[in-house]
Amino acid sequence: MSIAEPTVRNAARLVYKALHTALSPVNDNLYRELLDLYRADPKFAANVQDIAAGMELAILDFSERGLIIVPTSRDSKFAVRIADIRSNLKSDQKAALVLAHVAIASVFFPTTDGLEDDNYIPPPASVGEFRDALHALARRLKDAGEVIDDVPPELVPGWDCICALPSTLPNSQRATPNSVTGMVGVALTNMVSSGLARLDREAAEESQVTYTATHRLRVQLRELTLRRLFELAQSGMTTGVGA
């Protein structure tokens, strides 16, 4: 069995693997070896951190589940902006998709305690729960009647879009952002491909399909820049989605 050497090349390789968010050390021997090296060799770990910093990236978390790396600023080449989201979506749909991600996260983590406790494992949640949380968040924001502090104004078209959408559409049109359920589906597809969620159980009824959160989602939510928006979504979960 080959053992990874503490070279600069391998330090860069670990950053490279960490950027592949859907990659798991469970299925990648070299990734596991590099993580072991990061844990055991302070000089190698420092090289990894320096390479990440030079790429305007920060290491948020390290465990046997992988290295979690995020951009250090909104101007980073690796940062995702609303304008970068699915070029085939209209601007209001892109804003709505951001809200969908936040609503889904609030279902998995309805309280801050769950975020801070690494031993807490969010139970699987259904597409129907995500849909209801998204609609409740959009309605709460729309009813506020004005831009809320610390909530980006470019998201305003997003909640208007969600409130105007039907809850669901016929089977042939489900895989589109033209319903609240469809918007949730687009967001879940993004989250699965980014290593933030996993499919838990398929079901004949779309609203009954369930997903689970990953450790990566927990860590990234701790550093969330849309903190106020997430708190609003959480409050909707703790006071009742229909409130």
Image (cartoon, helix red, strand yellow):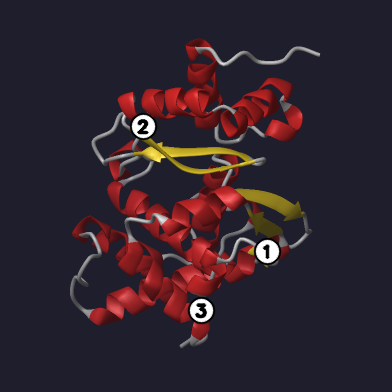
Q: Left or right of 30: which side holds 130?
A: left
Q: Does residue 219 appear to the left or right of 55 in the view shown?
A: right
Label 3 belongs to which residue? 237
Drawn side of residue 157 relative to residue 202, left or right:
left
Mark seen at residue 78: 2
| Cα distance between the residues tagged 3 and 2 | 31 Å
Q: Which residue is under mark 1?
A: 121
What amino acid is found at the position of numbered circle 3 in the picture?
Met
Task: Label 3: state its secondary structure.
Answer: helix
Q: Quadrant of residue 139?
A: bottom left
Q: Is residue 203 visible?
A: yes
Question: Mark 2 or mark 1: which comes first in sequence?
Answer: 2
- The residues tagged by marks 2 and 1 sit, at their Cα atoms, a distance apart of 29 Å
Q: CA distance from mark 1 to mark 3?
A: 17 Å
Type of the residue with mark 2: Phe
Instruction: Say which residue appears at 56% left-offset and 69% top-offset.
Output: 114
Q: Position of residue 63 (x, y in %)?
A: 61, 43
Residue beneath the point at 77% across and 54% down = 202
Q: Give the image location of residue 70, x and y in percent.
A: 41, 39
Q: Is residue 24 above or below residue 137?
A: above
